[in-house]
Image (tube, rainbow, N blue to C red):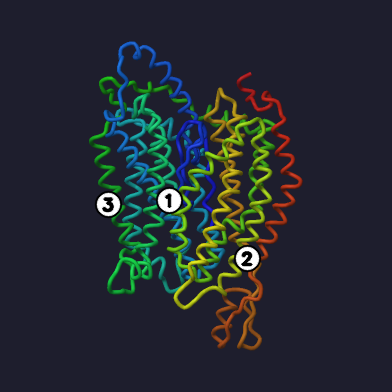
Amino acid sequence: MEPSDVIAHKNGRQRKLAGSAPANVNIGDLNRGEMSGSEPEEEDEAEGLIRGSDSENRRHATRPGIRGELGNVSLLLFLYVLQGIPLGLAGSIPLILQGKNVSYKDQAFFSFVFWPFSLKLLWAPLVDALYFSRFGRRKSWLVPTQYMLGLFMLYLSGTVEALLQSEGGPKVGILTAVFFMLAFLAATQDIAVDGWALTMLSRENVGYASTCNSVGQTAGYFLGNVLFLALESANFCNKYLRVEPKDTGIVTLSDFLFFWGVVFLISTTLVAVFKRENAHGKGKRRVQQEATKGVLETYKLLFTIIKMPTVFTFCALLLTAKIGFSAADAVTGLKLVEAGVPKEQLALLAVPMVPLQILLPVIISKYTAGPRPLDIFYNAFPFRLLIGLEYALLVWWTSSVKQDGGFPVYYYTIVLFSYALHQVALYSMYVACMAFHAKVSDPLIGGTYMTLLNTVTNLGGNWPSTVALWMVDPLTSKVCQGAIEQSCGSPEEAGLCVKEGGACVTTLDGYYVESVVCVVIGLAWWLWLGKKMRRLQEESPASWRCRINK
């Protein structure tokens, strides 16, 4: 039910993680999105942009408008759309797998697909430092990664149906490996495009990079997730798009992958041949290329930051803060699909949430602009825990509401209202956390500092979700009815139960156990560690400054 957590930074660019609902928000200096790993270099590029513009200001009395750079803006927008496609597809696979009755351990294994965007910091310095200067600093990575994305999609288009419909059930291991590579390549492409955006646009128009990012990636995710799930659903197509019903949707997963694989290959070839980096147009003020920091220097700086006592404590808190929400965030949507809610209907619920997701950060940022932004985080925490319990009640209620023709309108209204309440709590905590990141980051190394904090925040959401999915099956109790001396403690035992003419019946769903346990853990965190996090706001600014600068 919850979009994967997103991270923000100060450079005006936005990012969205795999599996999250589309969103496009702007919070003053803090824009949402997951931090690109190319930040350490972008801070220097921005400074070079400002310094290099003075002499050109004297030569150009007229400021160039956006019309002169519509081509560059369109290219950036298109590249971000391409980036969102594999993320949207990866977010749709768990819902497809749930319809094929895979275990929650398999879902947990597949959830590793969503980790690469949270770990970009590990290889981003390499992307910044290693390149072929003749071909272009960003194209050296953009072109091969997009070619590989296209080839992986073409490969999947011919094999994905067999992987999903094999005799022994979906081959989750192979699916995870392939989609993990797609996510890894998309994250690498993201680093390259983010860096190229600053040199592709003039100083007057560089702010449009943020718009291209948020709109493009949101559109790509929408195409790869919401639109695909709708067009792939036979029920949706028969109800809204066809006169004569059919057994399949308008498109299949293979068709969708093949189409976008071809688009990736053709568009990448055109970019490689016709688009040159750092072309200086008349009247444009370009960002001056800065010397790349050494890779070892960047890693050393990150290690120096995380060793600081205040930063280390804050990171430990960030890594544990979302344990209490993990069951609600990671499992609820899958449980609703298991209860019979159409996956395409769940995906479409993200659409009416977009206006709310735009307005909430703008409103909340007014209350987090002061000296104690984490107070909002602390106050919203128990509210979000209660919503987790409400989600569990919603799942329990779902089976009793189901009708022959599906679910009534009032049911979807309640689901939508619950989701909206969840967004209020989520964004209250998110904006507060991002405001604190901006407040404490050492301005001399702001890009690297923010990247580290945002990476830790992302990981703090990823690992509890994976563990929550993994623990559903062990916490679930089932008995074999209709067969003597049989049990359902394992898949093998369940198979024997069915073979003997029995059926496995769930007596205690592990999701409900998890929901209660997570809320208890979350409440304990709020009462004990939550106060410790609030006290971090009382630390002096010097305690957050990196010693390397002293």
The residue indicated by pointer 1 is 87
Real-space Cα distance between discs 3 and 2? Answer: 45 Å
Q: Are marks 3 and 2 in contact (CB under 8 Å)?
A: no
Can you see residue 294? yes
Real-space Cα distance between discs 2 and 1? Answer: 30 Å
Q: Amino acid at mark 2?
A: Leu
Q: Amino acid at mark 3?
A: Val
Q: Residue at x 33, y 70 (%)?
A: 238
Residue 361 rendering spot, x and y as whole percentages: 53, 41
Residue, far front: 410
Q: Nearer the viewer, mark 1 or mark 3?
A: 1
Q: Could you tell me which secondary element the residue under label 2 belongs to?
A: helix
Does 27 sit left or right of 155 as displayed?
Answer: right
The residue indicated by pointer 3 is 262
Along the line of sight, the residue nearer the viewer: 270 or 323: 323
Residue, far right: 528
